[in-house]
Image (cartoon, rainbow, N blue to C red):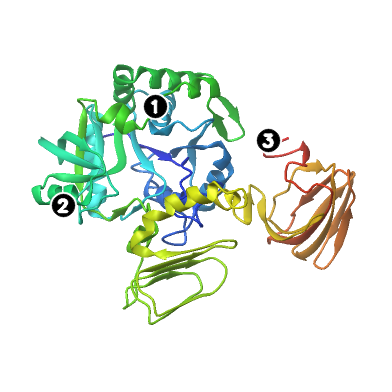
Amino acid sequence: MSSRIVPVILAGGQGTRLWPMSRAARPKQFLPLTGAQSLFQQTLARVSDGDVYTPAIVITNADYRFIVAEQASEMGAPLAGVLLEPVARNTAVAIAAVAVYARNLFGAEAVLHVLPSDHDVGVDAGYLLAVQQAAAAAAEGRLVTFGIVPTAPETGYGYIKAGGDLGGGVSAVERFVEKPDLVRAEQMLAEGGYLWNSGMFMIGAEAFLVECEALSPETLAAANGAVAAARVDLDFVRLEEAAFATAPNISVDYAIFEKTGRAAVVAVSFGWSDLGSWDAVWKAQEHDEAGNAGSGSVTFSHTSNSLVVTDHAHVAVEGLDDIAVIASEDAVYVGKLSEAQKVGPLVKLLRAGKDTVGLTEIHRTAYRPWGGYSSVLNGERFQVKRLFVKPGKKLSLQKHHHRSEHWVVVRGTAEVTLDGVVSMLSENQSIYLPLGCTHRLANPGKIELELIEVQTGSYLGEDDIIRIEDEFGRA
């Protein structure tokens, strides 16, 4: 192939199977579960070779747009586009919309490498060869999926039965198989020729859209309409909601790959996991001599085959086997590691309770394009928060109808605008913001600004913000 491959990164999922770390407001793709970088950043790194790939196109939930932009910026990774899904409609229309967008941007012959943003993938010579083989087949009109050679009778994955050899390391797809029970999974491994369905694809933009028109015309119509009426918002492309919402809520596997005669598969054996449960995270990490894996401040004593992840408190585990302890700022999960798939039903139980639903949606620390804040203490008419503002960033010019605020600078330098008057505050200085005043906080310095905010008033909700000016388009 002479032209570069267009990476397409699917980053809109809201999965909570890795609760309590993964929540609706910050799901697993944006968490550093297997290294210093988030899974999304690791996906960007895999497509960073400018000789092979163009800048990536990312499609994500509108709520995640600033996380995507910030994490890409941290890596210095340019993006060809960030498409925002107005409503959740599964992968078929998401990929179709990106294919339409990519065809407009790069031409009808563009080859797309479609990648989930929340998988753990080992890049080796076999991986790089598979990409070349799949791209060559896609350039000839094949819709290629990557099938992982199974190492165990897994019941959490779908399978692909490979068919006849098409040459160049590519085989036809004989059929797709739903997630099996254990007996069926063991039978397929014994029979041979079955591969795990990785959810990674290599497709020609035009070939894929032709198949959409033939096999799922409603999907194509929704994608065409959403892209045609899309609007640019800062560095993002907002797909048009009314058109996008008409798409069937269906995966690309069901809508296209299980029906098309163009389906092909490349069998690969590089390291891969969809990190769909805490036991999968444990398998992806390095273990001590007793089979334990830990992340954060952890002590194991007479413990084996266990996983501990903590982002706050020190966790010590004594005398246990096959245990998972996941400790976030405001919630702790404890269960058998081998039964980590049960986290999903547990999250549904938490969602059903009015006192616990928030634990599935937001973290105690909330991230914003300018930095973020952590809840420290809440009372009936007061709230204490820790704010952190990145160098060079500023919050919106705003006011509140129901609360006043007091800011105390802990670290860095704060530029405060209060009813048009600008003042500079350094460490240990403070300022009072009366109810109804117009105010703005900015960090003009070179280090992160940290301050304590004390709110008092009759209503302290985040929706009591009237934005007057905002560099992030939220006014």
The residue that label 1 is drawn on is 96
Question: What amino acid is at disc 1?
Answer: Ala
Task: Give the left or right position of residue 445, taking residue 98 as reference.
Answer: right
For the C terminus, the image quarter is: top right
Corner quadrant of residue 209? top left
The disc, 1 or 3, on the residue closer to the chain's N-terminal end is: 1
Local crowd size for mark 2, using a 10 Å CA cut-off: few (<14), some (14–19), many (≥20): some
Residue underneath mark 2:
186
Callout 2 amino acid: Glu
Q: Position of residue 58 (x, y in %)?
A: 46, 38
Foreground residue, 21 or 367? Answer: 21
Q: Name the secondary structure under disc 1.
A: helix
Along the horizontal axis of the image, is 237 left or right of 386?
A: left
Q: Residue at x 28, y 34 (%)?
A: 2
Dot 3 alpha-carbon crowd within 10 angstroms: few under 14, some 14 to 19, many 20 or more: few
Residue 224: x %, y % from top left: 44, 19
Q: Earlier in the sequence, mark 2 or mark 1?
A: 1
Which of discs 2 and 3 lies nearer the camera? The answer is 2
Relative height, residue 145 to residue 372 (above, below): above
Residue at 47% from the left image edge and 51% from the top image edge: 28
Is residue 336 shown left or right of residue 346?
A: left
Pinpoint residue 82: horizontal percent, then vertical percent.
51, 36
Label 1 – label 3 distance at C-alpha: 27 Å
Q: Amino acid at mark 3?
A: Gly
Residue 288 screen position, x and y as percent: 34, 76
* SS state under label 3: loop
